[in-house]
Amino acid sequence: MEEPLNLVLFSGTDDKLQAAAILTAGAAALGKPVNVFLQYWALDAFRADRIDTDHGLVAEAGEVGRQAVHALRAAGQASWAETLRQAKELGGIDIQACSLSMDLLQIEQTDLDPLVDGVEGVTAFYLNAGAGQVVFI
Amino acid sequence: MTLQITTQVDARGLSCPMPIVKTAQAIKTIASGDLIEVLATDAGSVKDFAAWSRTTGNDLVEQSVDGSVYRFVLRRK
């Protein structure tokens, strides 16, 4: 079987999550398995009651970047959450929450959006990653 | 000879990677050997559809551009 692409999402801002969603969707469209591991602020962004709210941008975006991102969204760009939902329909995408981050944020799996398939530790993540690339965003 | 299109994907106005994602979804609904037509306005789609075709084995049998609209016809593997 093809080695999976393994994305560790740490940042919870919309721009980084959008970039991650694009990488995920592209790989899924090519039939490549993708494992997504949610840590810290990225996990926080996947809370069911917050996933579709504004998560801001990284500081380097600045005002010009903020306007550019909003213009793209206004033109109809799918949000990162919607991109992931569409990509998951293709199959081969597994999204897991980091158990330590769950403790840190004091959240339960029932607090998370249905996009999240489960909770696991870093050892399980590495086991599933196999010899595939690991990308940290 | 005119190609017999089985299904169409209107991805005009969608940004990368949604034209490919929509196409990957739609091609699963047609039979092997049938044709799918895609319309897109994302400028990256020319290289993306070529790469997707090569990787997945779904042949890109026709492509053209009309103004800002790119048209692709693919045959399901």
Image (cartoon, rainbow, N blue to C red):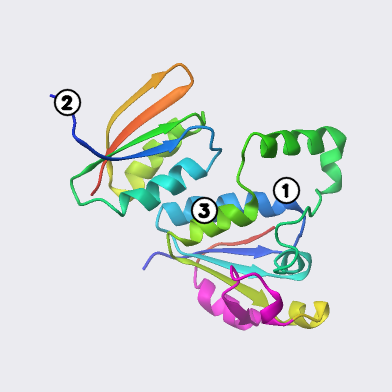
Q: Is residue B8 magenta?
A: no
Question: For the residue marked with disc 1, what is the amino acid?
Answer: Asp
**Mark number, residue A15:** 1
Residue A123's image quarter?
bottom right
Up-down relation of residue B4 to residue A134 (above or below):
above
**Mark number, residue A97:** none
Q: Could you tell me which chain the residue with mark 3 belongs to? A: A
Up-down relation of residue A122 to residue B40 (above or below):
below
Are discs 3 and 2 less than 8 Å apart at CB? Answer: no
Q: For marks 3 and 2, give the CA distance.
A: 33 Å
Read off the residue under disc 3: A25
Image coordinates of residue A3 in percent, x first then y, are 44, 65
Q: For marks 3 and 1, give the CA distance.
A: 15 Å
Image coordinates of residue A74 in percent, x first then y, are 69, 36
Residue B4's image quarter?
top left
Q: Could you tell me which chain the residue with mark 1 belongs to? A: A
Is label 2 in a helix, a strand or a loop? loop
Foreground: disc 2 or disc 1: 2
